[in-house]
Image (cartoon, rainbow, N blue to C red):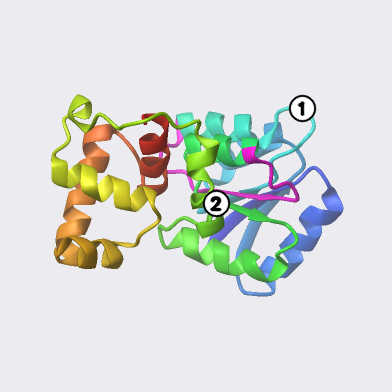
């Protein structure tokens, strides 16, 4: 795994580099700003960009948008001391792969490994906050998006934070069938992953 670390506090960035490299993960470069993050990403094309959100100049959200506009499959993991709801919503809407707090030093490397394996690391505590964060209205018009009732049921369960196994048990489907449904749903809606799907659901209620 090869990553880039960006934090406007150079001491923090160097500390993160030391922690991460001690676990055998290669840190290609460190940066101190959003502008540097964009340049370093273009130069190194890392597996994961580990980046602070609040930075002077271009913040992490705007930086992430610029990178994802050019690299649709970019994996961005936000690391911050702030758990502001506003940032959670922006990170989710933008398509980031994770959002963790700097205080959780022990969780940094496991989070990187999780993202590398194609999963998200927002955590259940973030997902459970989605209904209140997304200014939800009543009702989700699934027919408007050319979705079947079964697909709608799966979306609702994903938005509730259920895993594929839990969904398969609830709907009496195999896990493989649930994965197939999820792939079709994401393709229909032009979304990247189940977290974006949950955000989409709550945004359109």
Looking at the image, the residue that sits furthest to the top is: 144
Mark sitting earlier along the chain (2/1) = 1
In front: 2, or 157?
157
Q: Which residues are magenta?
A: 70-85
Where is residue 93 drawn, in percent x and y? 48, 35
Horizontal side of residue 188 vs 60, given as left or right = left
Confirm whether the magenta stretch covers residue 1. no
Q: Tag 2: Cα neighbours inside 10 Å, few (<14), some, or many (≥20)?
A: some
Q: Foreground: 196 or 166?
A: 166
Identified at 17% across, 29% down, the residue is 143
Q: Residue at x 74, y 37 (%)?
A: 33
Vertical relation: 5 (above or below) 1: above
In the figure, 205 relative to 17: above or below? above
**Residue 112 at x, y = what percent?**
55, 62
Dot label at residue 126:
2
Q: Is residue 162 left or right of residue 146?
A: right
Which quadrant is home to the C terminus? top left
| Residue 198 on image: x %, y % | 39, 43
- Look at the numbered disc 2 and give the secondary structure of its residue: helix
Q: CA distance from mark 2 to mark 1?
A: 27 Å
Residue at numbered disc 1? 57
Which residue does the image show at 24% across and 50% down from the upper left? 154
| Residue at disc 1, secondary structure | loop
């Amino acid at each position: 795994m090869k990553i880039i670390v960006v934090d406007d506090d150079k001491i923090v960035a160097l500390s993160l580099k030391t922690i991460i490299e001690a676990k055998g993960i290669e840190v290609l470069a460190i940066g101190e700003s959003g502008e540097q993050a964009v340049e370093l990403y273009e130069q190194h094309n890392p597996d994961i960009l580990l980046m602070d959100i609040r930075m002077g100049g271009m913040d992490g959200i705007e930086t992430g948008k610029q990178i994802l506009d050019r690299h649709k499959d970019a994996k961005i993991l936000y690391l911050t001391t702030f758990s502001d709801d506003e940032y959670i919503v922006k990170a989710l809407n933008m398509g980031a792969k994770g959002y963790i707090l700097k205080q959780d030093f022990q969780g940094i490397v496991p989070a990187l490994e999780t993202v590398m394996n194609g999963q998200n690391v927002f955590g259940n505590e973030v997902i459970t906050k989605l209904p209140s964060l997304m200014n939800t209205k009543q009702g989700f018009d699934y027919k408007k998006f050319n979705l079947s009732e079964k697909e709608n049921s799966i979306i609702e369960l994903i938005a509730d934070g259920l895993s594929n196994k839990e969904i398969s048990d609830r709907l009496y489907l195999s896990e493989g069938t649930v994965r197939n449904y999820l792939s079709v749903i994401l393709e229909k809606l032009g979304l990247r992953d189940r977290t974006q799907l949950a955000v989409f659901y709550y945004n359109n209620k």
